[in-house]
Image (cartoon, helix red, strand yellow):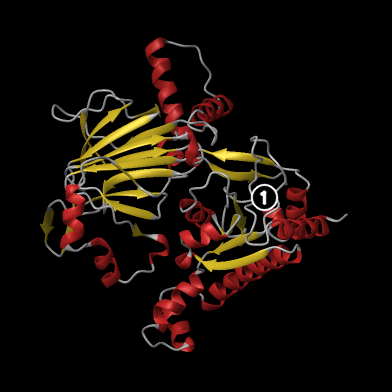
Amino acid sequence: MSASRALLCACCTSARRFPLGRVPVRPFSAAGEPRDFRPQRVAVVTKTTRYEFEQQRFRSAGLSEEELKQLLALKGSSYNGLLQRHNIHSENVEHVVESLRKEGIEVKVVKRRDYDEATVRWADAIISAGGDGTMLLAASKVQDKFKPVIGVNTDPERSEGHLCLPVHYTNSFPEALHKLYRGEFRWQWRQRIRLYLEGTGINLTPVDLHEQQMSLEQQLRAQNVDARQEQSSAAVSGPQLLPIRALNEVFIGESLSSRVNYKVCKPRFTFSLHRASYYEISVDDGPWEKQKSSGLNVCTGTGSKAWSYNINKMAAQTVEDILNIVKQHKSLNLTLDSGLIERVTNEYNDTLIFSPEEQKMFFSVREPIANRVFSNSRQRGFTSKVCVRSRCWDACMVVDGGTSFEFNDGAIVTIAMDGEDALCTILLDD
């Protein structure tokens, strides 16, 4: 019996047994044993392409398609190039959707901006159609640890897609589906970060940063709650668990890294000096420490290959300089050939990466300031819990680069992990 016929028979059987409602599809049995991937309903979350973004932005200003072409040319962007990438993405999305429907699966296609909790509840599985950013957004609203989230890279030439299926399946999605039906894959539980927010004057209203599609007026409306909301937020006594989980990382710092601290004026030009982020931090319930830095990054094993890795990795040139200093001080008879330097560099950088399934985090203090007032006993390291008390004036806490929460003076966040927050994903060989 073919996979599609087996799926349809299973659906018919379920319909006879449960005439008043749909049978919930779970990737695991009641005993916790894994079973085949056979969803009845799938939500496909698609990214907004750069072409769509520009079109929406300037069409609202009354520009024609020809005027849009001219404006993009003035910006140094190619209208035809953007349209081509848009068409590639759209064709790959259609390929995924048609492949699902041919297997008798009910499909709902939603744009990123329309993706909500109701869509998640409706679906047995979520497929993100875009790149890593779309995958992060798709995952952010899934709280059910038994609901799989799968990423498909719809523009492999322009997107890395580390969190997506191997690019081979972008144009061969039926092959991926049949492997899933046959159980030729591995479930992967990607651990995620949960956040408890408390303190004075906190604002639990998130600001969606994805695609930067909001107008200035919308941003101000999202960031400023009315008096009743402010009062209720200020009156919160206990820690509030935020309804979002971080798959990659959480970043805390001043809203704008180039925010004006004070200006230095000279004839014909003005430049601004950087405002550091001021906060107190406790790692693994240790003593509180006052710090000033460019911000704090806390990542998961999934995120250890992303921003955190680039913050902390060492360049081969740096390793060579350090080894030369060691040779001078220790009088070592050591030949620093390119092979040795490359091995040492790679071995150090590899220590920054850990499995997405490990229930631990890695914190990094960016560009710490150390003096008689501010200390930095640990700049980076593995941890199971981080607490941060804000002393900032215009700070934010950004989850996976897409959702921001105000995090100003008096706000306290506890950053931790819980196995119940793990995201159900799939590993499929190329």
Total marks drawn? 1
Is 91 displayed left or right of 134 in the figure? right
- Viewer-nearest residue: 403 or 345: 403
Task: Name the residue at the right extreme.
Answer: 1
Locate residue 415, reporting x and y percent: 35, 37
55, above or below 38, in the image: below
Q: Residue at x 58, y 68 (%)?
A: 109
178, above or below 294, in the image: below
- Viewer-nearest residue: 335 or 283: 283
363, above or below 120, in the image: above
87, above or below 197, in the image: below
Does dot 1 land on a helix, a strand or a loop?
Answer: loop
Is 141 displayed left or right of 424 in the figure? left
Locate residue 193, reporting x and y percent: 42, 40
Q: Residue at x 39, y 15 (%)?
A: 328
- Quarter of the N terminus within the rendering: bottom right
Neighbourhood count class around disc 1 (C-alpha, 10 Å): few under 14, some 14–19, many 20 upward: some
Residue type beneath disc 1:
Pro
Q: Residue at x 27, y 24 (%)?
A: 377
Locate residue 126, reporting x and y percent: 58, 56
On the question of residue 172 being in view, the answer is no
Residue 291: which quarter of the image?
top left
Locate residue 297, reporting x and y percent: 36, 40
Is 345 displayed left or right of 329 in the figure? right
On the question of residue 373 being in view, the answer is yes
Check disc 1 and report the residue beneath it.
Answer: 166
